[in-house]
Amino acid sequence: MTRLAALVLALVLAAPAWSAEPPLALDGNIEQGGLVIGRAAPGVKASLDGTVLDVDGSGVFAFGFDRDHGRSANLTVLYPDGTSVERKLAVAPRDWQIQRVEGVPSKYVTPPPEAMAAIARGTKLKKEARATRAAGSFFTETFIWPATGPISGVFGSQRYYNGEPRRPHYGVDVAAPTGTPIRAPAGGTVTLADADMYFEGGLVFLDHGQGVTSLMMHMSRVDVTAGERVEQGDVIGAVGGTGRATGPHLHWGVYWRGAYLDPQLLVGPMDEAIAAAANE
Ligand SMILES: [Zn+2]
């Protein structure tokens, strides 16, 4: 080592980890349905509106805003040296469409009493899966479309099934033939895999880390099991029309803890994905 290099190294080691502003970068969409990725420093603690966030070993953390989130949120980051940063985030509101879905079998709009046991079984499985948060920070990968095709439903729409108001549409629908492979949009850990849910049909939850979870519904085939680790692009099952669906399509939803997020904010335009697939 030259003397100059040794001097530079000594200065680097002597300097505090940061001199003026503690490091904090936020990427993503600070809007209703948006996912935000924070990058701070190893050893930080972070919280959003009082909820303690998971933070990985390099200081990366994720959080998101529900469809109906209010106009502001407060992020607090506490650094190992005792300094802290408070950021007041302006959460952009969005407009939502109204979507009417006709021709839904009535047992999925107003389930009969004999369906209650199946519905309760599904509710329990989903609740258990949602109580877990997987390791890893795969949510930092650039997401890919799990399947391509015409977009037949967007996130956030107020839905009416056969004229009956039901909860908003918490995902994006991609029309594709039954049997079309569904690929993991990013790496993660499977936290639920069930071929026969009442409303969702074939259903997979894939946790991309810290609870940022993709869910795939109406699958004709489920190729993974709970606990399995998958890489981005791995086939996890196939498109179908099982459960409350009027035709074969992929429903791709994303949630983080209690908040449903808009998958389309995580991926590039569909036409680019289709063009890229055609060139393979
Ligand atoms: Zn859908």
Image (spheres, rainbow, N blue to C red):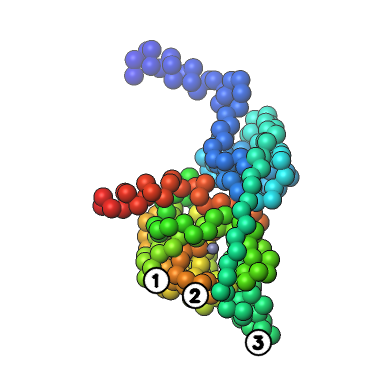
Residue bearing the label numbered 1: 178
Q: On screen, 51 above or below 159?
A: above
Q: Is residue 172 left or right of residue 273?
A: right
N-term-proximal mark, 3 vs 2: 3
Q: Position of residue 237 (x, y in %)?
A: 41, 68
Q: Position of residue 167 (x, y in %)?
A: 66, 63
Name the residue at 37% across, 70% down: 179
N-term-proximal mark, 1 vs 3: 3
Name the residue at 31% across, 53% down: 277
Say how many tags the image has.
3
Q: Position of residue 141 (x, y in %)?
A: 44, 46
Disc 3, SS: helix
Amino acid type assigned to the residue bearing label 2 in the image: Thr
Q: Is residue 204 left or right of residue 108?
A: left
Q: Position of residue 35 (x, y in %)?
A: 57, 46
Name the residue at 67% across, 36% down: 89
Residue bearing the label numbered 2: 242
Q: Quadrant of ligand 1?
A: bottom right
The foreground one among 96 and 155 is: 96
Image quadrant where residue 42 sits: top right
Tell us which disc is closer to us: 1 or 3. Answer: 1
The foreground one among 67 and 202 is: 67
Q: Check whether the beta carbons of the residues at disc 3 and disc 2 lie within 8 A of each other.
A: no
Q: On screen, 21 above or below 226?
A: above
Amino acid type assigned to the residue bearing label 1 in the image: Thr
The foreground one among 83 and 167 is: 167
Disc 1, SS: loop
Amino acid type assigned to the residue bearing label 3 in the image: Glu
Residue bearing the label numbered 3: 114
